[in-house]
Amino acid sequence: MRYIHPQGSRRGFWDSLLERVEQVYDLEDTMVVINGDGAGWIREGVESFPNCIYQHDRFHISRDIKGALPEAFKNKSVEALRDNDLGRVMELLEAGLERTTGKQRKRLEVVKENFRSNWEYILDYRVRLQALGYDCSGLRGLGSVESNVGNFKSRVRARSWSRKGLYAVGNVLFKVMEGSLGNYTGQVVNRLDERLKGIAKAGAQVVKKVVFGEEPGIKKGHFPCLDQGNPRVRSHVPASVGGGLRKLEANSSGCSPRPHPFCLNGNCGCPACIA
């Protein structure tokens, strides 16, 4: 058994699936069975394959019938559906209409009409294939997967699956069913190792540039205290020290000395005074 995980939007789903399936099977000699819940876009898939039949999902039919019929008819209807006795199911639906009223009756009428209009597709696909001459020994019924979809619809505190998260979980499940999860995780680990090596190499280049790429020297900056107009501040910086700092600042910045707004005409030790 093979599991295929097609990609793409709903519009391109069948094209993507057809491309993947053709890589594995010769579709000219293969009968394709599509199982769906009645949604139109799923039925459209029948047109994508040369030999294909549609199966209306038995899980949905069984659920709808049991939910609409009175209690006395539920088990009988499920047994009849399991035996592919669709005539008997229809009889039970009609009998149920005689025992129901109001909203339950309207609901049962909808279920009955849905059953009647999908009669051909509700009949088990194995019965139909046998009528066409196919050997169906070993084939299983469809619909068991649908009963587990609720596990993916679980919402906790208003949370729901994102498209990215659901795709990731689906991809892992397909790999598990294919028995190829080990190979897949090995490829992921190898790609991760290569990525980490690339990050480490890039980081080493940055460190090398910082450590060896710049020439050592005096850190360029400014001494704000030398520009203060408060005499108390300037009094703590002797003229010789202040002049030396300003020369250092001027040399480190590569700019010529310029007087500041509080120049004391030769008494404050600014570059203009020293010059």
Image (tube, rainbow, N blue to C red):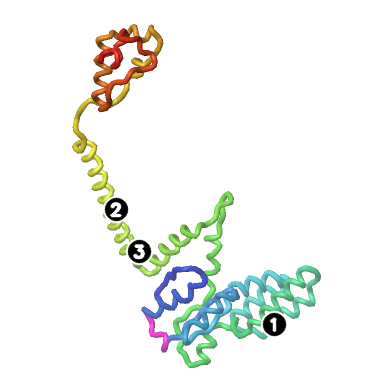
For image coordinates 54% across by 69% down, the residue present is: 146
Element class at badge 1: helix
Element class at badge 3: helix
Residue 12 left/right relative to 185 = right
For image coordinates 66% across by 82% down, the residue present is: 117
Inter-mark Cα distance, 1 to 2 = 62 Å
Amino acid bearing label 1: Met
Amino acid bearing label 3: Leu
Look at the numbered discs 2 and 3 and tell me whether their residues touch, using CB distance below 8 Å. Answer: no
Inter-mark Cα distance, 2 to 3 = 21 Å
Residue linked to disc 2: 195
Amino acid bearing label 2: Arg
The image quadrant of residue 118 is bottom right
Residue 200 left/right relative to 63 = left
- Decide: is 274 above or below 103: above
Task: Give whichever of 5, 139 is nearer the camera.
Answer: 5
Element class at badge 2: helix
Task: Locate the N terminus by quadrant.
Answer: bottom left
Residue linked to disc 3: 181
Label 1: how many Cα within 10 Å (few below 14, some 14–19, many 20+): some
The image quadrant of residue 135 is bottom left
Q: Which tag is nearer the camera, tag 3 or tag 1?
A: 3
Label 2: how many Cα within 10 Å (few below 14, some 14–19, many 20+): few
Name the spot of residue 236 as percent of width and height, x first: 33, 8
Residue linked to disc 1: 90
Magenta stretch? 24-29
